[in-house]
Image (tube, rainbow, N blue to C red):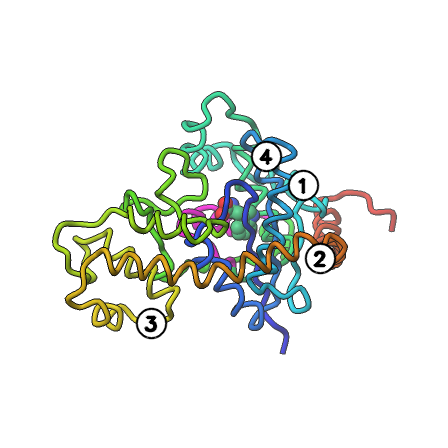
Amino acid sequence: MKKKIMYSAIQPSGKLTIGNYVGAVRNWLRLQHEYKCYFAVADLHAITVRQDPEALRKRTLELVSLYLACGIDPSVCTLYIQSQVSAHAALCWTLNTVTYVGEASRMTQFKDKSQKHSDNINMGLMDYPVLMAADILLYQAQYVPVGADQKQHVELARDLALRFNSRYGETFTVPEPLIGKDEGRIASLQDPSKKMSKSETENPNASVYLSDDRDTILRKFKRAVTDSENCVRFSEEKSGISNLLRIYCAFKGCTIAEAEREFEGKGYGTFKLAVGETVADVLTPIQSEQARILGDRAYLNEQLAKGKRSASYAAWKTLSEVYRKVGFYRGD
Ligand code: TRP
C-alpha cells in the first residue's frame, strides 16, 4: 500500500523552544514511519522579515542538525532546505495568479506581522501563505501538521488547490491540517495566556530554548509565573501551574493525574525544580548530538544533497504538470 504524504516545515528564525519540540519535531519522529514525510527548513519564508545573512545561514544549519539530533531519520524521510529547491518559488508565482489580493490581505498573520514590522510591509510578507501553499501542493501532501496559528494558511492552501483544480483540471491533492493535541500546546512561562514563542524578545525568561543549558533551564522554571495556592493541581484558573504540569508530563511521559499525585503536599519550589531537571535531562543528550553533527560538515552536506535530490524530483513532477496545464510551451 502506498503511504500517505505529509509535509511540514519550520522557519530558521529565532531559536526553537520546548514548545516546538513537543508540539512539532517530537511528533514527526513517530509520523516519519507512518507517512511519506517531507520536512523543510523554510528559509524563503524567513526573509519576509529582515534577517542578518550570516546569522540566517548559521541558524539554517543549526536547525538541520537539530532535526537530525532529535531523531529525524533522513533514510526514511526527506529533509531539505527550501531555497535549494527552486520549484517552490516557481509554483508560488503561478499560484499568485489564482490568489485574490483580498484573501491574502485578510490573513491574520499578515495583519499581525504588518503591525509588528510596520517599517517593512513587503510583498513577501503578503505572499507568505501563497509560498506556503506552494510548499504543500508541490509534494501532493495530504496532511500538514502545524500549530493552531498556521491553520488559516493551510486552509488557504486547500482553497487554492480546489480553485486551481476546477480551473485547470485535477492537479493537486487537497491538503488537510493536522493540529497538535492540547497537551502539546506549551505556553509562555511568564504569561501563560500566550503561546511560548521562538521570537520572544521582551522577556528572556518566557521561553525555554532547546539550546539552553541546564542552569538556564532551571533558572527559567524557577522564575515561572504561578499562583499563591501552593498546590500542584491542573485547573483552567491555574494557568501557570497547569502549563508547568503539561510540560512536566510531556517530558516525563506521564499523565497529569500521575504528576498531581507525585507532587501532592509538595510546594511549588520542589515542583519547579523537578520540571526543570526533567526538561534538562531530555535536552542535554540532544544538544551534544547536535554539536557533534554540526561539527561533521561533510555528513551534513551529504544528507542535505540527498534531501535536495529527493525533494526536487517530487516537486518538478508537480511543477511540470502545472506548467502544462496553464499553457506554457514544454517543447513536446
Ligand atoms: N509558516 C510555518 C510556520 O511558521 C512554516 C512553514 C513554511 C510551513 N512552509 C510550510 C508549515 C508548509 C507547514 C507546511 O510555522
Q: Observer-nearest residue: 178 or 67?
A: 67
Foreground mark, 2 or 3, reads: 3
Q: How many marks?
A: 4
Per the image, the residue denoted by label 3 is 254
Residue 240 lies left or right of residue 315; in this view the side is: left
| Above or below, 97 relative to 234 | above
The amino acid type, in three-letter code, at marker 2 is Gly
Secondary structure predominantly adopted by residues drawn in magenta: helix
Per the image, the residue denoted by label 4 is 47
Disc marking residue 307: 2
Q: Could you tell me which secondary element the residue under label 3 belongs to?
A: loop
Per the image, the residue denoted by label 1 is 89
Question: Which is more N-terminal, label 4 or label 2?
Answer: 4
The amino acid type, in three-letter code, at marker 1 is Ala
Q: CA distance from mark 3 to mark 4?
A: 39 Å
Question: Which is more N-terminal, label 3 or label 2?
Answer: 3
Q: Residue at x 41, y 27 (%)?
A: 115
Disc marking residue 227: none
